[in-house]
Amino acid sequence: MEHARLRQLIAQVTEMNDEAWEASIDRFKIKRLKKRQYFLKQGDVCRQVGFIVSGYTRLFYSLKDAEVTKDFNTEYMFCGSYASFISKAPAHFNVIAMEPLTLLVINREDLLDLTERFPSWQKFLRIAMEQLFISKEDREALFLTCTPDERYADLVHHHQDWVNRIPLKYLASYLGMTPETLSRIRAKKI
């Protein structure tokens, strides 16, 4: 069942023949994490990327006196530090399970082998990276050009499911505001 969800996602992006899929199945291993268990710690090298089957992760920076939320990854998304995964350099942020988490994980060598052998894997990863780049560019523009109220409205529009699922303090950090500011914004919307 876990692998079927990954195949559904791939099918939304590109056709993958049975040979490419069969070569992939054994390379993606099921991994389960408990709530608050780390998938990746800041400073460690990311040796696997994970496709989230159920649950969600929070990506955050550990600073001297605070944590700053970078992003969240939910079902049907990948998690990890792609920069660390590819470059083998230490990750700049943590990835932690915020609920019991089921993932399909693959290591760098296996993923690179799949992309070398199968054009469908190349296409899937290229499109995934393009979507990630667009998302990050949109988020940067949001931070540089929008008010806190507008950032929250954008979150509600694009990630309505996060509003009730993710604790307020983490949403506030993700939006670049204090929990009190986010509470005031939410109170105005009711």
Image: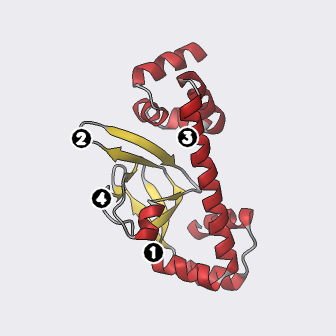
Residue at the left extreme?
Answer: 64
Q: Which of marks 1 and 3 is nearer the N terminus?
A: 1
Q: Which of marks 4 and 1 is nearer the N terminus?
A: 4
Q: How crowded is mark 3: few (under 14 residues within 10 Å), some or many (20 or more)?
A: few
In the rendering, which numbered label is found on residue 43?
A: 4
Q: Residues within 10 Å of mark 2 (few under 14, many from 20)?
A: few
Image quadrant occupied by the N terminus: bottom right
Q: Residues within 10 Å of mark 4 (few under 14, many from 20)?
A: few
Point out the tag, 3 or 4, that comes first from the N-terminus: 4
Q: Is residue 7 visible?
A: no
Give SS at disc 3: helix
> Which residue is drawn at the image coordinates 63% and 64% (left, top)?
5
**Which numbered disc flags the more N-terminal residue, 2 or 3?**
2
- Quarter of the image where one finds residue 25: bottom right
Residue flagged by tag 4: what amino acid is it?
Gly
Report helix, strand or loop for mark 2.
Answer: loop
Look at mark 1 in the image and give the residue it sits on: 107
- Depicted 111 relative to depicted 6: above or below: below
Query: Could you say where residue 32 lies in the image, as x and y percent from the top left?
Result: 41, 62
- Under circle 4, the secondary element is loop
Instruction: Work out which quarter of the rendered image holds the C terminus and state it.
Output: top right
Work out whether mark 2 precedes mark 4 in sequence or the reverse, and give the earlier one: 4
